Amino acid sequence: MVNAHTPLPAADSTAPMNKALTIAVVGDVHDLWEPADEQALKHLGVDLVLLVGDFGNESVEVVRSIAEMDIPKAAIFGNHDAWYTATHWGKKMRTHKEDRVQIQIDLLGEAHVGYGKLDFPEFNLTVVGGRPFSWGGSDWSAHGQFYKERYGVQSFEESTAKIVQAVKDGAHDTVIFIGHCGPKGLGDQPEDPCGKDWKPLGGDHGDPDLTAAIEETLLLGKSVPLVTFGHMHHGLRHTKDRLRKMIDTSPHGTVYLNAASVPRIVQDDTGRRRNFSLVKLEAGTVTQVSLVWVDEEDAIVSEQGLYQAESAPLQIL
């Protein structure tokens, strides 16, 4: 079991976070992960990496490479990471005998926070994962057998309880949630962060159990500055005239970030470029979010500002 994050001595969970953190969110990978990604992240000076899943179709070697990354990290698996395991049609396509879902879970070890948590005392925050391997939406029956067999969970209510228990087990009052699909409640238009962009168009495809868990976390008196996810790609299926809405906010000060800029690595006449979403966290508050593209020299060649707190001055992350 490979884990690059070595916990530091426990910190006072009520102490303020004085250091401004740069968090990189890696959107849906879909087999596009290279050693140059770790190099770029280190060059960008990120403090923490959050990976929102879909590493590939049960792509063990991609997960192995990510597990070996020597930067503090937390990850959750997406639906493609159980592509041949979680559905009847997937099982019919399966040609391997080994349990690749479990192999991936074992490789990431404690860095995998699906239905769990990882404390980062050096940052005075806890990262909590939503339901792993999520396909999104409000139909439990579609993949209920998978969750019953793997996690003993048989409903959205039980799923919510499992996520909330991870929050309660966390050491810190500042909680960041990561999911593969985002929470329900961010809009039902095709362009919304979790809006359904296939026919029939429209409808909220977010995870209701994640929504309920966030609400219960706030009732516990915890702070939730960031909820980040992927699954619903920025490029829309029904139109090429615009992209999906990537950011939403709540009255509680929570920033919701859809990081699924796919493909995340592109090659053209100018060379090879890769994208990351960069989040600046100061004193437990998100002050800035940008989508950046990095070239082969690890230089930022494009930066799209997605969010800027009203009191925060604009700056390059």
Image (cartoon, rainbow, N blue to C red):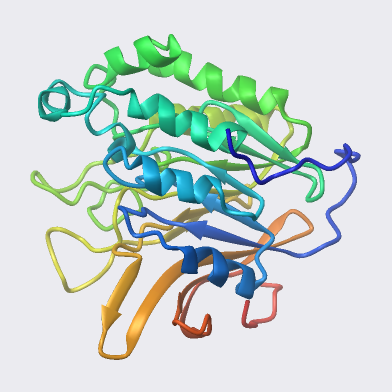
Label count reads 0
> Looking at the picture, how far across and down is residue 221, in whole percent?
74, 33
Residue ID at (69%, 60%): 47
Q: Can residue 70 be seen from the camera position used here?
A: yes
Q: In which quarter of the image is residue 93?
A: top left
- Which of 258 and 190 lies nearest the eye of the viewer? 258
Query: Is 47 rendered above or below residue 185?
Result: below
Query: Is 146 rendered above or below residue 191?
Result: above
Position of residue 36 in the picture relative to residue 165 (left or right): left
> Looking at the picture, how far across and down is residue 103, in whole percent?
42, 29
Q: In which quarter of the image is residue 98?
A: top left
Position of residue 129 in the picture relative to residue 149 (left or right): right
Q: In which quarter of the image is residue 204?
A: top left
> Looking at the picture, how far across and down is residue 117, in whole percent?
63, 32
Residue ID at (64%, 82%): 314
Position of residue 262 in the picture relative to residue 111 (left or right): left
Residue ID at (19%, 47%): 202
Q: Which residue lies furthest to the bottom in this view?
A: 270
> Looking at the picture, how far across and down is residue 132, in whole percent?
43, 31
Q: Can residue 53 be seen from the camera position used here?
A: no
